[in-house]
Image (cartoon, rainbow, N blue to C red):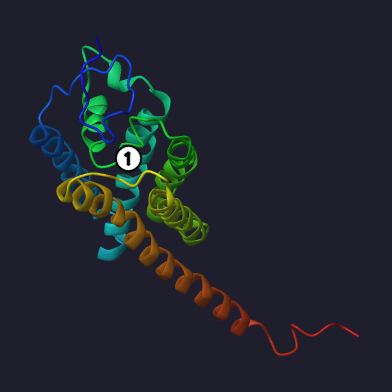
Amino acid sequence: MDSPHPYSPASLELPGFVPQQMSWEFILGIFTIFTLIVFVGGYSLTGRVKSLSKLDRLIVCWWLFTGTIHCFVEGYFVFAPDYYKLNPTNYLAELWKEYGKGDSRYPARDTTIVLIEGITAVVEGPASLLAAYAIVKNKPYAHALQVATSIGQVYGDTLYFLTAYFTEEKLDVGPLYFWGYFVFMNMFWMVVPFLVACRSWGYISKAFESSRAQKPNGANKKKK
């Protein structure tokens, strides 16, 4: 007989479900430590690059953080569909069991969610890590890549929220899971990418203005 699960609706069928074995305090604690390591370590290491401003260094840390999350955490969800059946389990499986309490579309393997997460893991994950590299190495495509990847993140998160709102079965979870997991944790991928995209858009616009200003008079006119 399958073990009962904590997700909504209770009628959701999860054959072979193995109850969560790690506490939510441990799961969130490990995630918090990982976040601190990436930001503190990344900020410290990028301090060796004298051309980077403090804000640049923070943005590099963001891209390292989000790239790792996309590739490994979300990638695990996409490519390990039986994570809720594993016994013995592992940290990533337990993390998704816990997060599923805020959005049961994950353990249910909702098609839209799997597709959104798949694109995020395969495309936006590597692009995020490449963006971090491009900033550190001052590559000419750094800002264009940041704009494109940020738009992809905002678009994916927008779909994530809207599909939950318009679904026939509304998310029936407690306020802690709704505001803590579903809203708070995902809003970072709406707010931060939007700000990063705006900043990079400004740099690209200034570069074009500067290039146009440096052209001699009549350079843009067609030769007769």
User: Residue 105, how many percent across, how many down?
Assistant: 36, 37
Q: Nearer the viewer, residue 9 or 90?
A: 9
**In-image side of 34 versus 186 (left or right):** left
SS at badge 1: helix
Residue 67 visible? The answer is yes
Q: In this rendering, is residue 148 above or below 219? A: above
Counting the numbered discs, the total is 1
* The residue positioned farthest toward the top in the image shown: 1
Q: Quadrant of the N terminus?
A: top left
Q: Horizontal and vertical percent for residue 118?
A: 46, 36
* Residue count near mark 1 (Cα–Cα under 10 Å), binned few <14, some 14–19, many ≥20: some
> Vertical placement of 204 versus 222: above or below?
above
127 left or right, relative to 77: right
Q: Nearer the viewer, residue 143 or 34?
A: 34
Residue marked by disc 1:
69
Q: Amino acid at mark 1?
A: Ile
Q: Is residue 60 left or right of residue 221?
A: left
Residue 32 in percent (x, y) is at 15, 43
- Residue 86, x across and y down, in percent: 27, 15
Which sits in the foreground, 36 or 11? 11
Left/right of residue 71 with respect to residue 10 in the rendered view: right
For the C terminus, give its image quadrant. bottom right
**Of residues 97 and 10, the one drawn nearer to the viewer in this rendering:** 10
Residue at point 28% right, 22% down?
84
Residue at 27% across, 58% down: 58
- In the displayed structure, 67 sits above or below 53; it is above
Residue placed farthest to the right in the image?
224
The answer to whether residue 53 shows anywhere in this view is no
Residue occupying the point 33% across, 60% down = 192
- In the rendered image, which quarter is residue 93 located in? top left
